[in-house]
Amino acid sequence: MIDQSLHSRLSVSTTNGDGFGLGWYGHPGETPYRYRSVHPAWNDPNLREAARAIHSPLFLAHIRAATDTPVQETNCHPFRHGHWLFVHNGLVRNYHTVRRDLMLAVAPELFASIEGTTDSELLFFLALTYGLATEPVQALERMAALVEETGRRHGVEAPLTMTMCATDGQQMVAVRYSSETQSRSLFHSTSFHHLHELYPDDPRITAAGDDAFLVLSEPLVDLPEVWEEVPEQTAIVARAGTIMQHRFNPHLP
Amino acid sequence: MIDQSLHSRLSVSTTNGDGFGLGWYGHPGETPYRYRSVHPAWNDPNLREAARAIHSPLFLAHIRAATDTPVQETNCHPFRHGHWLFVHNGLVRNYHTVRRDLMLAVAPELFASIEGTTDSELLFFLALTYGLATEPVQALERMAALVEETGRRHGVEAPLTMTMCATDGQQMVAVRYSSETQSRSLFHSTSFHHLHELYPDDPRITAAGDDAFLVLSEPLVDLPEVWEEVPEQTAIVARAGTIMQHRFNPHLP
Amino acid sequence: MIDQSLHSRLSVSTTNGDGFGLGWYGHPGETPYRYRSVHPAWNDPNLREAARAIHSPLFLAHIRAATDTPVQETNCHPFRHGHWLFVHNGLVRNYHTVRRDLMLAVAPELFASIEGTTDSELLFFLALTYGLATEPVQALERMAALVEETGRRHGVEAPLTMTMCATDGQQMVAVRYSSETQSRSLFHSTSFHHLHELYPDDPRITAAGDDAFLVLSEPLVDLPEVWEEVPEQTAIVARAGTIMQHRFNPHLP
Amino acid sequence: MIDQSLHSRLSVSTTNGDGFGLGWYGHPGETPYRYRSVHPAWNDPNLREAARAIHSPLFLAHIRAATDTPVQETNCHPFRHGHWLFVHNGLVRNYHTVRRDLMLAVAPELFASIEGTTDSELLFFLALTYGLATEPVQALERMAALVEETGRRHGVEAPLTMTMCATDGQQMVAVRYSSETQSRSLFHSTSFHHLHELYPDDPRITAAGDDAFLVLSEPLVDLPEVWEEVPEQTAIVARAGTIMQHRFNPHLP
């Protein structure tokens, strides 16, 4: 996180210094935990403590380069609702123009749980409104369709750029999508079982268990066969050792 | 500010340590300036610098005791729109329940200018929606009526407690009102011309000019004849040396 | 912590809003963990997460009311060196006058580990210099004697007020002392084995195990027989279920 | 500042996001004013307000990329003592090793005014100790010599890299120096009287008065003849329209 916050190679912004966040799961069934800070990741002493203290089967981390909303903890990812955590890299174009319409589309009973003012959190609550908990990929497709339909109604040509990941502690859903088909990068790890045979002495590989699985916006280590790029306009769902890949096809309900 | 932030005597909370803000006017016609911070007023070194550096014919200061919204700069008063500044001491009861309805009542063209998530800022934007710039007292009465009507529709008995002050640099409008007629305190200064005769040697009095005018939630110095309490359910409008007092009577447009 | 930060009853300052800190131990032999923040404890969302996430056999918590040094994370307690954690409530009088002399008395090899600028951290490093790790009470007595000798040399009548607690994860050393014999309060819990018989249904008591032990600047619950006040000018050492009480008698080595 | 904080071209760190500061002078004889913040310059709303509000005949600005000391306001430049302001870009190598010796060399009567923990502030107080107020260049040469002598005594080969600027509101003293003769960049503006003839229509040039003078670590606009690079191992002193250039030659008093 610290390295990427200072020198992101594949991101739109090389500097991601507008806060960061960690989310992680403890015992099954518990609400996930979260640590968010407005400091740049590279100079938050508590982050180094947390990295040492936290042991978890599943965690989510995010570093922020604010697009056009304030730097404050409530705008730091991951966003959380019930057992779900959500991180996003991208933007809703002309957000200030479409924000009101999108907020109205959030289920009234979820509205009070919106804490911040970012487009990212609003995407999360729209996905929750459309059924993220039960049909995650379809809910995300409906959300994306609503954002595109709303944007176009306001004259925005390419309303949505979205590379996101959500999890409920059991499954991980990640999407690489953009209205203009020029999405930000997304990678996932290949089989660590295989990688352990390939790199038996590389501590960066052996540190992970056979069933480790990583979803990342940029490769973490420069080694062949470790990372697979998620194709454009694609959703992946990882659950219990299996990875499913779906064409991501936004459509309204 | 520092003293009151630590030991408020008339406030609901004795400690007001959840950020603070200053707003002030420079040359006529300019957008007012603002300094806001999430630090408690008593430990922000920049506040002491600002107090020394700023010279202005008109300023507004606020210390915050958060009711139920996050401590972040966008939630610190004064709120600003165009030439208007707004501070508030009070709350919209069951805010999380009524927030969505109140947000919908904000004029769509003003919606994108809402930066934070407090009830106070929302009251300001509702007042702007209802004509604060042209008929300030009536706009505030309409806003209060809407909040009360919305709250009661959601089963809230005493929806609004509001001691507020707004200014456009020319006039100062202050209201002391609450649905339950138990409003928080509000005072204004009496004639400094008269006070200068009364206390010719007290530096706290002589420091102010003959036409100085202060609106305060608590008296600043303990001297007789300096302060006049604003009665319950009352608006005052101060402009060009005159102070008008109005019965504050919320009613929908 | 949140309650005490807003309404301390026995402290010199009723408001303790100048940051806070937590220190805790994980597996035996590990460096203790720490979370420090300059926010008032009552409005730091990460503190509520940490309180939910952290499980530890031994932790230290502190809320700060700054005396005369800046509010910054490096000045928040607990201070840490190796396996030791240190918290302090009190002050070195005329600290700005004696600071240079006291800093010179810190062992040169420890000097570079001082991160902040408080009197409290300096007391800790003086105690480390005098052998805190091997003879904790004697080291603290030497440190107190040095501070008193240095202060008196600079004309300070009552140089030291110190209610402190230090731990290495195995033992807990706490001192209540002041040059003027008017020390700040200090309490420890009595036998929870006995309290469980006394209050079998009070969840605040049954939540703790039979061998729980608490050292506190103020009683946490208002129940008879739960707390024992540490007398003036006294050190206590708690280790493996035993509590030793010593007369605290500062003397130079 | 905002642009340079994100994309410094000539600095060692491209990102300078570890706080920033402004210092400026009001009426002659007044203590200079200061605004410092730990936020990255690019996301501090108060900086944009300050830039609009502050009018001053002389100001100093600094963005920080921390080398090895904490990000906190007391470590943000400019440092201030009396009428002097001081900013620094560079480092004392092996600072943690030599810090104690350097602190001891600060005049005891100045010691208590050191607020932070950086090498930069310590350089400032050493220069004050050696007579910055009366013989600025010589005081800086003595300070540099002490740092080099101390570093070499601890086995540091190239102890000092220092590009700095100090002012008392009347004169501006800037130095470009390093033990290894590879100093960080430093520029000053040429005659704006001449530049106004050269670029009569460029608003970036016409915005400045005929007697404007800028000292900068990087050129602000890409136009020929505007900037002059300060040579290696050189001090400049600007006062009342004249610029003197001196060979910077560290030597102990």
Image (tube, coloured by chain):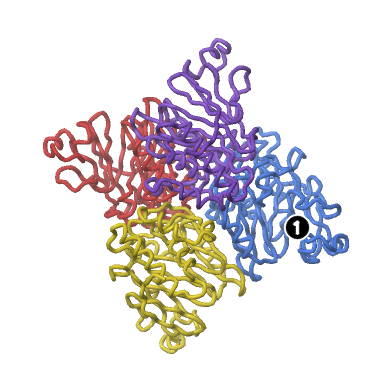
Chain colours: A purple, B yellow, C red, D blue
Depth order, front residue of B137/B204 = B137
Residue at the farthest front position: A253
Using the image, name the chain to which the residue with label 1 belongs. D
In the image shown, does A47 or A155 lie closer to the viewer?
A: A155
Q: Quadrant of the N terminus of chain A?
A: top right
Return the x and y of residue D38 as percentages of the image width and height: 55, 49
Query: x%, y% of residue A122?
Result: 48, 45
Q: Nearer the viewer, residue A59 or D157?
A: A59
Q: Is residue B132 shown left or right of residue B68?
A: right
Say which quarter of the image contains residue C25. Answer: top left
Snapshot quadrant of residue A219: top right
Pointer 1: what residue? D214
Provide residue B28's location: percent of width, then percent of height: 61, 75
Q: Is residue A185 left or right of residue C234?
A: right
From what the image shows, is residue A43 above or below residue A233? Answer: below
- Kind of residue at disc 1: Leu
Q: Residue at x 37, y 48 (%)?
A: C63
Residue C146 shows up from this direction: no
Q: Position of residue B5 (x, y in %)?
A: 40, 62
Furthest-top residue in this view: A197
Pick whichever, B23 or A76, lies toward us: A76
Question: Which of the 4 image quarters holds residue C170?
Answer: top left
Circle 1 Cα neighbour tier, 10 Å, few/some/many (<14 / 14–19 / ≥20): some
The mark total stands at 1
The residue sitting at the left extreme is: C198
- Residue B32 visible in the picture: yes
Element under disc 1: loop
